[in-house]
Image: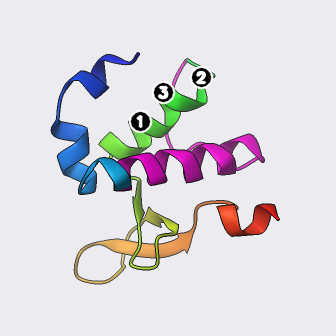
Amino acid sequence: MLEVFKDEAIVNKVGGRFKLSSLIQKRLVALNRGARPLVELLTKNPMEIVVAEILGDKIYLDNSGHVAIAGDGGPTDGRKKRDAGLDLDSLT
């Protein structure tokens, strides 16, 4: 278990346990299907990469429940809606 999950900060950052679980699952699918990591880490562990992306405000769930990438020059909250890789709907 990663130490970050022992603290509630990551849960609060995303907006709850369900949203955190959904975000992690969807981003893991994207990484496993070839999406490039948004952070540079020495590890190849996809879970550690996803956690670093969340803590670094690189990814979030948009209003429709899809993974989106935070970017420059977006709306007032600084988030730019871009595809963060394949979503679960594309698996079928």
Q: Which mark is residue 48?
A: 3
Residue at point 39%, 60% (across, down) = 60
Residue 29 inside the magenta-drawn segment: yes
Q: Distance between the residues labelled 2 and 1?
A: 10 Å
Q: Residue 51 carries which label?
A: 1
Q: Which amino acid does label 2 sit on?
A: Asn
Asked if residue 36 shows in the view, the reply is: no
Asked if residue 76 shows in the view, the reply is: yes
66 sits left or right of 79 in the view: right
Above/below status of 63 relative to 9: below
Q: Please, what secondary structure does the residue beneath circle 1 have?
A: helix
- In the current view of this chain or complex, which residue is farthest to the bottom? 75
89 sits left or right of 41 in the view: right
Above/below status of 44 relative to 33: above
What percent of the width, then of the height, locates residue 41? 51, 25
Q: Which amino acid does label 3 sit on?
A: Glu
41 sits left or right of 45 in the view: left
> Magenta part of the protein: which range?
19-42
Locate the C terminus and report the quarter of the image it occupies: bottom right
